[in-house]
Amino acid sequence: MVPGRSKKWWIWWIVIPSCIASSMKYIEDYDPVNVARCDSKCDGYSPIDQCMVNCLSENYTKPGNCPEENSMSPFEAACLEACGDDSQCPDFTKCCTNDCGVTCMMPTGLEDRDDIPPIPENIEIRRDKTTMVTLNWSPTKSPVKMTKFNEDLINDEQSSIRYLVEERHVLGPRYLESRLSSWSVRHVSSKPHASIRAEVKTGHWYQFRVAAVNENGSKGYSLPSTPFKTAAPKNPREPRNLSLSGARVQPTTGNLRIFLRWRQPSSDVPITFYKLFWSRFIRGPPNDSILVHHQSLPKEKNCYEIKNLEIGFQYFLQVQAISLYGDRRLASRKASIVFNSTDYEKYGRDATDSGI
């Protein structure tokens, strides 16, 4: 073993999903661990896509042993026919029989296998002033526990190991484990020294974990990294592209109704609702307008019909986007448009596609 190599840490950059490895296209339809295994197995094959499809379709026997039946919990020994072979079980679990059924269970004996890469350890996160983070981990156990396979693995930078990087997150100012998203794959890579680009969002808490996989399988995921919080979110941008249409006179009152439309603005955290304001415009001191009405609308709406407007006046219409971040209310600037009801006929186009 080369001196000092056992302590070397691989560095991964996380920035944009478009830079992820080609094997990621199979992740949506197949188990991620099996995708990483097949990517390792098909390394050097041509055409690789045909190799991947054949590998992912085969009945793969996963490493390890089924647990002894007397050690199974009641849940593990459930009377179910949950699988037919290992390839039907997610992640690292095997299809195991018990007195009453067949279920997917975590295998035993993986620690004794020297033909499978060790579980990565000691994940650390380094952050800069942008939305980028650097993910570091140690690819091996301590030198005392290293096997001949692991020594060869560290010395061989062309080895066919794949690193499966996953993350989970929760939106909010406080870390709430019960509300964390499910683990999702961010990258599968054959290059421990390569840069991976994927972005983290503001206003979130994140955790990462890593599994090392080769064509023989994997020993499992690392412990999750310490949760870290990204920068606090900014207020939403103001709603875009305000427009008016569908103006028509109400026969019973002689007043106007008109549709106000807008487009959703960009926001660090999801828009929760919109607030609408409309005022009749009055020139001169002490004020330029007098508030007449306001209305709150759910985030799904991007159109509202304003009713009972009088002909011959100017109206000042405004839309504001609101996001909730914990107990904080983040409000955008108000987007504005002026409506001269004297010229209502030029807004008379039908608003059948208003979305209301």
Image (cartoon, helix red, strand yellow):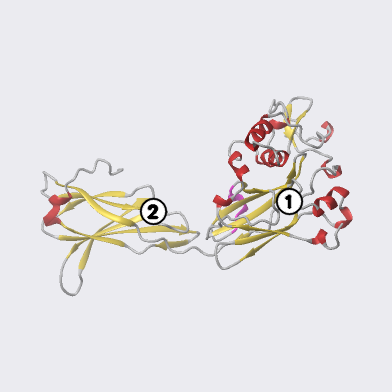
The stretch drawn in magenta includes residue 258: no
Give the crowd class for mark 2: few <14, some 14-19, many >=20 residues within 10 Å.
some
Q: Which residues are magenta?
A: 175-181
Distance CA(mark 2)–CA(mark 1): 40 Å
Residue sitting nearer the eye, 329 or 12: 12
- Mark 1 = which residue? 222
Q: Position of residue 126 (x, y in %)?
A: 65, 64
Name the element at disc 2. Answer: strand
Asked if the residue under mark 1 is in contact with the one under mark 2, i.e. CB atoms within 8 Å, the reply is no
Residue at point 33% right, 57% down?
240
> Looking at the figure, which quarter contains the C terminus?
top left
- Mark 2 = which residue? 273
Residue sitting nearer the eye, 56 or 305: 56
User: Which image quadrant for residue 46?
Assistant: top right
Q: In the image, 189: left or right of 140?
A: left
Q: In the image, 215: left or right of 132?
A: right
Question: Which residue is outermost to the front?
Answer: 46
Residue at point 70% right, 31% down?
87
Q: Which mark is in front, 2 or 1?
A: 1
Residue sitting nearer the eye, 220 or 11: 11
Any mark on residue 19, and which? none
Name the element at disc 1. Answer: loop
Q: Position of residue 69 (x, y in %)?
A: 82, 31
- Which of pointers 2 and 1 lies earlier in the amino acid sequence? 1
> Looking at the figure, which quarter contains the N terminus?
bottom right
